Image (cartoon, grey):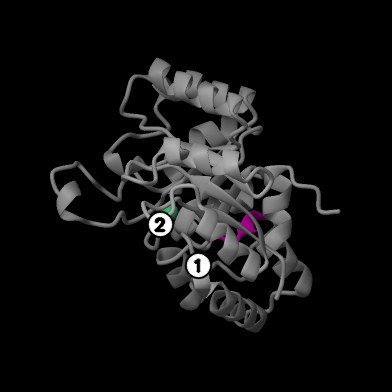
């Protein structure tokens, strides 16, 4: 069992303080996790705050921000959570904004000034009856919609979740190859899909930009670790690449000392 950091987890309605999840992490060698807020009940910023307060140095917070709200309101929310020790901002651009828009520049400046990273849900967003009335689209949830802030703010580390989405994974490959502050996680389903299908362009990628994230693998961590180890090795990845993927890159981004 290798030591791991999971860069992409959530609280749940059944386990709001994530006490049960901590026990699962202990069992499977997951030393730390970044916990992202969202709009879903049980996964909101209040639950994230409660979980990270209960488990310092194991769980790290990522504040969900809705960029359809007025920018000063978003800035206020980010500042408040940075003061609580949060490490990251979580965005769902599927709701139809373009994060490259010039009006967001003051927002990005604060994210950089507060030393936060930013994890972006990319690609398809799950469908449900409750969300059916919302304006949900995949088109705005791609890495290129973050190119302007990524070019301007080298102090912000961007992580494109789900490897930037299935159809748009080449945008991820492009930005990871060009900008040192761009990263991606391999979270299921599209993050897994892109790698499982050995899509063109993945071979030459610098693995100091690729991170292990699971959207709560739970007791699936063991099987998951085995699958990724075998699969990436079969794609020619070295032991050093795997160490960075499972642990080193996330430790660097979160500022965790790797002894
Ligand atoms: Zn997620």
Q: Residue 169: x percent and y percent?
A: 45, 59
Q: Residue 31: x percent and y percent?
A: 68, 58
Which residue is pictured at 48% across the width and 53% down the height?
Answer: 161
- The quarter of the image that holds ligand 1 is bottom left
Which residue is pictured at 32% across the width and 24% down the height?
Answer: 69
Q: Is 157 left, or right, of 256 in this rendering?
A: left
Q: Which mark is residue 168?
A: 2
Q: Is residue 69 above or below residue 191?
A: above
Within-10-Å neighbours for mark 1: few <14, some 14–19, many 20+: some
Q: Which mark is residue 189?
A: none
Q: Nearer the viewer, mark 2 or mark 1?
A: 1
Disc 1 residue: CB within 8 Å of ligand 1: no
Kindly state the secondary structure of the residue where label 1 is placed.
helix
Q: Is residue 205 above or below residue 150?
A: below
Within-10-Å neighbours for mark 2: few <14, some 14–19, many 20+: some
Q: Is 224 left, or right, of 207 in this rendering?
A: left
Which residue is pictured at 33% across the width and 41% down the height?
Answer: 39
Answer whether residue 93 is magenta in the image: no
Q: Residue 51: x percent and y percent?
A: 53, 44
Q: Is residue 204 visible?
A: no
Q: Which residues are magenta?
A: 209-213
Disc 2 residue: CB within 8 Å of ligand 1: no
Kindly state the secondary structure of the residue where label 2 is placed.
loop
């Amino acid at each position: 069992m290798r030591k791991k950091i999971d860069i992409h987890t959530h609280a749940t309605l059944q386990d709001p303080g994530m006490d049960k999840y901590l026990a699962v992490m202990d069992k499977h060698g997951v030393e730390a996790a970044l916990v992202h807020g969202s709009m879903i009940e049980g996964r909101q910023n209040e639950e994230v705050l409660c979980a990270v307060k209960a488990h310092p140095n194991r769980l790290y917070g990522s504040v969900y921000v809705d960029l359809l709200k007025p920018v000063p309101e978003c800035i206020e929310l980010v500042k408040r959570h940075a003061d609580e020790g949060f490490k990251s901002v979580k965005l769902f651009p599927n709701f139809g904004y373009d994060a490259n828009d010039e009006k967001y520049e003051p927002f990005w400046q604060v994210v950089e000034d507060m030393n936060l990273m930013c994890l972006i849900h990319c690609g398809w967003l799950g469908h449900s009856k409750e969300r059916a009335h919302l304006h949900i689209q995949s088109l705005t949830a791609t890495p290129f919609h973050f190119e302007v802030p990524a070019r301007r703010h080298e102090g912000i580390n961007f992580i494109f979740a789900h490897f930037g989405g299935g159809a748009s994974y080449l945008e991820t490959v492009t930005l990871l190859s060009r900008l040192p502050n761009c990263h991606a996680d391999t979270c299921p389903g599209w993050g897994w899909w892109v790698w499982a299908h050995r899509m063109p362009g993945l071979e030459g990628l610098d693995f100091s930009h690729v991170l292990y994230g699971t959207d709560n693998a739970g007791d699936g961590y063991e099987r998951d670790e085995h699958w990724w180890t075998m699969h990436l090795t079969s794609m020619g990845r070295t032991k050093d690449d795997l160490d960075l993927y499972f642990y080193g890159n996330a430790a660097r981004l979160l500022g965790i000392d790797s002894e």
